[in-house]
Structures are given as structure tokens and as C-alpha cells.
Amino acid sequence: MTTTIQFEKQTKNLIDDLKSVCANYGLGNDGNEFKIITQVFLYKFLNDKFVHEVKQLDNKIAKADNWEAVLREYNDNDYEMLMMQMSESTARLQPKHFISSLFERQNEANFSDIFDNTLLDIAKENSDLFSVLTEGGEKIILFENISKYVTDKRDDFCKAIINKLINFSFENIFHEKFDFYATIFEYLISDYNTNSGGKYAEYFTPHAVAKIMARCLVSENVSNVTCYDPSAGSGTLLMNLAHQIGETKCTVYSQDISQKSSNLLRLNLILNDLVHSIPNIVKGNTILEPYHKDKNGRLQQFDYIVSNPPFKLDFSDYVADLDSKENHERFFAGMPNIPKAKKDSMAIYPLFVQHIMYSLTAKGKAAIVVPTGFITAQSGIERKIREQMVERKMLRGVVSMPSNIFATTGTNVSILFLDKENTKGDIVLMDASKLGTTVKEGKNQKTVLSPEEEDTIIDIFNKHEAKDDFSVVVSYDDIKAKNYSLSAGQYFEVKIEYTDISPKEFGDKMKAFESNLSSLFDESKTLEMEIQNNLKDVRYDN
């Protein structure tokens, strides 16, 4: 077993142990379980990262048998100096905050209060770095009272957690990169951010989709760029994009209406060395109250935008509030009609697509997951949006994905790519719907792309290659001629096979056709006479 696989197994075992503690205290499948698991996991991660970095800075601590004792001997000035040398992405902790300190105090009275106050103190001291903002400017701090979710035996519950944490260390895995932490993060939240959707449609975007979007958007070296997701969820798309660019070469921005998703995104940023972007993570309604603005009050524009927006959502309560002068430019294609019934089926994704188009810089690029019906709709908002993509010369391509790429939604999806520098055209339309292998996931069928199939999509798209019955390269004029359809299938060449034959072969074939036809006509006449004779024999009997 390789070291990485071993660490991955140990990390997953810790997660399972924490879930077991919750189950033993009546929190299994409880709505608050994910808050406890994710916060405790984060506390452990930040604790061990602090220890790891302190040992890098002070050789005396690194060599000590009891590093905590050495660190406690620091006077206030020396300790502050040590803190100033630490990276900005590391939480500032005091010796009383260490897991080892809590372990030593677990038999004190009211230990649950000691435990909770420790987490709250860490959150307060690191508020500027780790807090998520709301659209109203309030801060959602790193931790909260965890033991409050347990009805009784709160001290025992907190002791059980500390005893799980003390026997595990992250120190040996801080050198691991994106793929490791992406796997761990998905395992950590697998029970709490499923494909079930719900009111705010918090779908977990498959990594194959996220990988294709990131690698088709960024195929060359870039630096000092901004990345944005207006419906970020737990951040799968942003993490893949940031990893493709380089975590130190980009700044991440996001907004999402769900507090749960915003908290999970914060955790994802911490795991993936993107702590510097946490102040840009906002909990709020992007469509109604977009948060990120420039110094003049206009919506901020971004170099790269990725999004898997909710497709349907009831926004009838605030659709009238969107009718403002500033929004007329942002939502240039208009607002969806409000149905009399089934308002939860209102299509909200066209508003996100328009918002993204409006939020791109002059050289901006975007990748958006849309229902495949969007690329061929011949009327309404969808058609108007596609027309503008062509008229503004900002379309780069479309990849239509296999059905059931998301396990529990029957909606076929496509990835829409925009590029404001693609003024000359050369647009790639791809039909990847026949790729993938169908597997069972719970009660549902899911299509899984192999790594080779993912690479095929990425390579052909980035090379702008045409491949029979798979991809086609078209111009803006071609798209206009096809009523702005972005479906690859409508551009595939209809092939007619021709066979060269001699005059004699042609004559022989014609004679054969004539002979067959004569035989069929004779048979038809015989059948006609038989039917007429049979009809003469039909009698009426009382």
C-alpha cells in the first residue's frame, strides 16, 4: 500500500469514527450531524497544520519529545514573533487551544463548555481570515457551540470526540495536492451534500464534468486572475478551476444562497490552500442581490467563471424586484413568465447565464452547465440569449454530455463555453452523449466517463478538431443559418455512399428490378381475383 493510499485510508477512518460518535449519542442521520462532523474535522486539520508549521519554523520544537511543553515556555513576545512568521493561511492558535490541551482537561467539570469555548475562541481570534460574509455584511464565523446539538451527556460526547482526534495526525499529509484533498472532501460530505437537490438544488457536480470544464477553460499558463461562481455550492467547480490555474495564481470569488454550502466551500478552500480567498465567499442571493461590486458600485467582472446553477426554482416572490434600470442591462433577454401552478418549476438558470455573460471581463471565459434543451430552444429567453452570444461573438463551444451524468436527475445537460476573445468564430460543437458506462448508484443509474473519455473530450475541444459524428467546427454565420442551434447533430454531414458500376452492371440491375416488379404485379392480380371470388361466396344466414 502506497503512503498516499495509507493516509487516505486513515483520514477516512477518522471521519467514520466521528460519525460513529455522533450515532452513539443519537445524532446519526440528524440534520445537525454534518455541522458537527465538518467543524470537528476542520478543528483537527487547523490544529495539525499549526503544529506542522511551528515545527518548520523552530527546530527546537521539531526535535522535542514534548513540543507542547516547549511551546508553552515561550514568553508573550517570542510567541507573537513566531505567529508573525507563519503563513497567512494558518490559523493562529494559543497553547490552550491545542487538542492535546483539551485531552489533558477532559476530566474537568463542564468539559463540554471548555470544548465549545475553545472552538469559539479560535473562531473569534481568526475571524478576519476565516469568516464567510452574508450579503448584508454579517460574518459567519468558523465554529459554533457543538455540544448544544446533544440533548444529554454533553461532557461525555465532547470527551469521545477528543479521544478520536488525539490518536490521528494530519502532519504527514500536508504535502499532498488537490487530488488527495478532493477525494477526502467528497468522502467527508458524501452524506450531507448529495444529488438529492432540494429547495436550493445543491447538486454535487461530478468530478468528470468539473475536470472537463476546468481543462477546456484553461489550456495555457495564466496568473493573477480572478475566478467566480455565482452558485458555488460546496465548490467542486471552483476547486478544479483553481487547481488547473494554480492555487497561488488566482483569487476565488463566490456567492450562494445556502449557508450550508457556503460553510462547506470554506472548508474546501482551507483544504486546498486557498484560505486567502475566504473573505470573497458570500452567502446570499446572487440574482436578487449580487454582492461583488467594484469601487463605483457596478458589478465586478471576472476573468474565469464556472457554474452549475439551479435549473428550476420558485423566485416569484422577488421577480418584481428585478425590474430595475440596472438589471435591464444584466438581464437583457428578460424574465421568465410566472406559471399559475408549479411555481417551483420556474426556470431560473437563464437568469444565471445572463448574469455570467454580464460579469465577464473583456477577455473573460466561462463554462456553464445548462439543460440540453437550452441549446436548441427556438423561442423565448433561451433563444434570445443564444442570439446574443453569437451577435456579441463570445461563443466558444458546447459539449453535450451523456444522459444520467448526474445520478438522480433525468435532465440531459450540456456544457456551454464562452470566450469574449473568440471574435472570429471557430466554434466547437460536440456530441459526447454516446460516451460513458452506465453503473448503478443506489436506486439510480449513472453514466461514468473513463479518464480516457474525459481526455478525448478535452483534447478534441482544445484542438478545435472535427470528428465524424462526434464534433464539428462551425462559424458564427453557420450558427445563424441554423436558427442559432448549438446542437452538434444538426451540423453533422449527411453521408451518401456511391458505388461505381459499369453500363452492363447497371443494365443487369435494371432488368432484375423489372423482373421482380413483373412478378409482384402478377402475384397482386392473382390475389385480387381470389379476393373477389371469395366475396361472391359470402352469404347472409339467419
Image (cartoon, grey):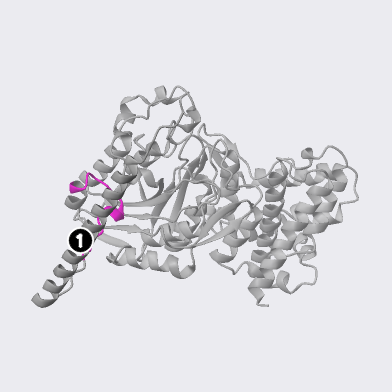
Asked where in the image residue 446 lies, by quadrant, the reply is: bottom right
Residue shown at 68% from the left, 77% from the top: 1
Highlighted magenta segment, given as a residue range = 481-496
Q: Amino acid at mark 1?
A: Leu
Rendered location of residue 106, percent (x, y): 87, 51
Residue 421 horizontal side relative to residue 318, left or right: left
Asked whether 298 or 357 is in front, the reply is 357
Q: Is residue 502 visible?
A: no
Rendered location of residue 19, percent (x, y): 75, 52
Residue 75 horizontal side relative to residue 225, left or right: right
Is residue 393 in the magenta section?
A: no
Q: Is residue 361 above or below residue 293?
A: below
Q: Residue furthest left?
A: 503
Residue 48 horizontal side relative to residue 254, left or right: right
- Count of numbered marks: 1
Rendered location of residue 398, percent (x, y): 33, 54
Which secondary structure class fits the magenta region best?
loop
Q: Is residue 302 visible?
A: yes
Q: Secondary structure under badge 1?
A: helix
Asked whether 478 or 149 is in front, the reply is 478
Rendered location of residue 85, percent (x, y): 59, 61
Q: What residue is shown with label 1? A: 517
